[in-house]
Image (tube, rainbow, N blue to C red):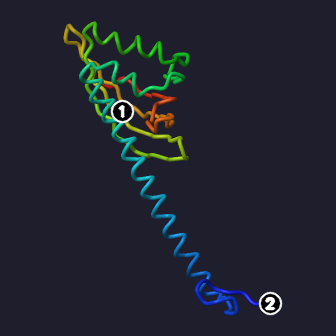
Amino acid sequence: MRQSTIGQGANAPIEPYAIASVCRSIDRELENVDQTHDDAAAAALRALVETWITATKAGDHERVLALVADDALFLMPGREPFGKAVFANMIRDQKSGLQIDGTSEVKEIQLLGDWAFMRSRLRLLLVTRDGSRTRQEGETLSILRKDASGRWLLVRDANMLAMQP
């Protein structure tokens, strides 16, 4: 029984090293495709974080809410998990004079197809209308999902902020 290599005819034997070389080449190409996809997805997730922070600082509540899936859940210490409607009411309270400034430093992004999780360090400064200031800082763990149009949306957010002196 004879085996062949592509382009050498039906009677040519396949050299084992040639198969291994082709397999390594295909693996490298697939890694490059995966890495490019992962880089683009990570960039899109970092852009989502930047949009969230910028919109929060500007008081653009609708823009923030557009980044949240309808079935999202938020988890915070000392509170029962709550959904998008409660979150919407919380951020709309900013109109009552609360200003928020902050930064989010993305520490880790893991991609799993149309799902991702992201770990970040969040630092906030909250200033009330009367000028009192509160600092909060801590880790967050967020789970995101691509919607049908390919946009990333927040579906779970565990926020471990603590008051800072």
Question: Whole-percent x and y of residue 143?
Answer: 51, 35
Q: Quadrant of the N terminus?
A: bottom right
Q: Name the residue carrying label 1.
A: 122
Q: Amino acid at mark 1?
A: Leu
Kindly identify the residue that appears in the image at 63 percent across and 85 percent down: 5
Image side of residue 9 versus residue 140, left or right? right
Residue extending farthest to the bottom is: 12
Q: Amino acid at mark 2?
A: Met
Question: Whole-percent x and y of residue 36?
Answer: 42, 57
Residue extending farthest to the left is: 131
Question: Whole-percent x and y of residue 150?
Answer: 46, 39
Kindly identify the residue that appears in the image at 45 percent across and 40 percent down: 119
Kindly identify the residue that appears in the image at 33 percent across and 29 percent down: 52
Mark identifier at residue 47: none
Label tally: 2
Q: Within the image, what quadrant is residue 50 found in?
A: top left
Q: Name the residue carrying label 2.
A: 1
In terms of secondary structure, where does tag 1 sit?
Answer: strand
In terms of secondary structure, where does tag 2 sit?
Answer: loop
Q: Within the image, what quadrant is residue 130 found in?
A: top left
